Amino acid sequence: MNEEQLMGTARALVATGKGILAADESTGTITRRLNSVGVEASEANRRAYRDMLLTTPGAEAFISGVILYDETLRQESLGGLPFRQLLAQRGIIPGIKVDLGARALAGFAGEQITEGLDGLRERLAAYAGLGARFAKWRAVISIAEGLPTAFGIEANAHALARYAALCQEADLVPIVEPEVLMDGNNTIARCEAVTTAVLEAVFDALYRHRVMLEGMLLKPNMVIAGLKCPVQSPVDEVARATVRTLLRTVPAAVPGIVFLSGGQSPELATAHLNAMNRLGPAPWELSFSYGRALQQPALQAWAGDARQVPAAQALYLKRARLNSAARSGDYTCAME
Ligand code: 5MM
């Protein structure tokens, strides 16, 4: 394990004014995204869509790294250069999603466990050989009556920690993503309680697996009412609850926290990040690793039409720029 390299990569991913684009949708997820704008999810269309995003001129001013799916890491851009090289040439760090998806947790109805540990050491070595410098693994935690169970949380924390230790052995910075889903009808208080329990378990497992906290990043959900909850909290309340939860659970040695957007609108995801950064100095960088909140307007503008690439790229660049502003609390709705 090269500690200096891991710490340097982790810090570069949360460099001032920059954040991460999550473009690591698995085949099933990208199929749903492309179908939602009337585009067939063929290999050619997946490549054309990722090409639109990854060749956006000027994105490197706001984007430090991109999480890719296995297919994209191995694919060539439409210009003939492998995507991973195209990114590296622009100073954007290529990363790779290495989990194999969440499946039903046997014996625990309504809960999921993320798979992909078998053979992971060999896959990580291969990804490092292809130029990836960081990796990502997502655990999925649902809130419902009686859920999550302590066992469901523990099982996912254990898998995240095993993944993170293997990544550091391979000199890849692990992004540890325990996602408490935002799609329920739960209150913000319930989200805070569940997120606290999940993060306590995750950092306990990371400690026991000897993961070097300075060489990793955390990718959590924000503390927010479920999207179906009739009472939605104002932006400042979400910011305060989220930072309070993180202060209670995330060691200061972790260099950065890169939020997922989880189905929030692009504007709200930016406003929440901005409000957190306005609360004042935190022990870690507070940044973004958004998928939908960076891509959605661009996906809709592109909709499979090559003539719309410049317009779509402008929309992606705008979201990247506004989230960059939110990193220093300098975003305002007027900038929309
Ligand atoms: C939670 O999803 C991650 C962040 O995306 P959002 O900002 O849209 O919430 C994202 O990186 C996710 O892990 C990938 O899209 C892969 O998802 P699947 O479901 O295909 O594994």
Image (cartoon, rainbow, N blue to C red):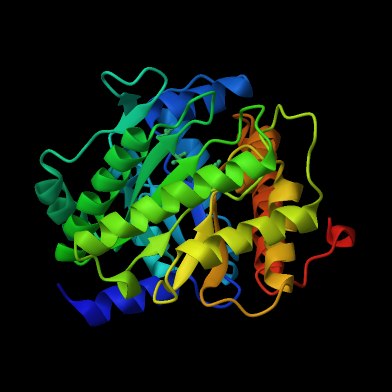
Residue 64, visible in the rendered structure: no
Q: In the rendering, at what x and y percent does residue 50 appear?
A: 48, 42
Q: Is residue 296 left or right of residue 158?
A: right
Q: In the rendering, at what x and y percent does residue 84 appear?
A: 34, 56
Check the image and name the residue furthest to the right.
334
254 lies above or below 97: below
Q: In the rendering, at what x and y percent does residue 238 appear?
A: 71, 53
Residue 140, visible in the rendered structure: yes
Q: Residue at x 54, y 23 (%)?
A: 145
Q: In this view, does 21 lie to the left or right of 235?
A: left
Q: Which residue is drawn at 79% across and 29% down?
A: 230
Q: Residue at x 59, y 42 (%)?
A: 191
Tell me the quadrant of the picture where the C terminus can be found: bottom right
109 lies above or below 76: above
Front one among 74 and 191: 191
299 lies above or below 201: above
208 lies above or below 222: below
Number of callouts in the render?
Answer: 0
Q: Residue at x 32, y 77 (%)?
A: 7
Tell me the quadrant of the picture where the N terminus can be found: bottom left
Q: Is residue 313 left or right of residue 71?
A: right
Q: In the rendering, at what x and y percent does residue 65 appear?
A: 44, 62
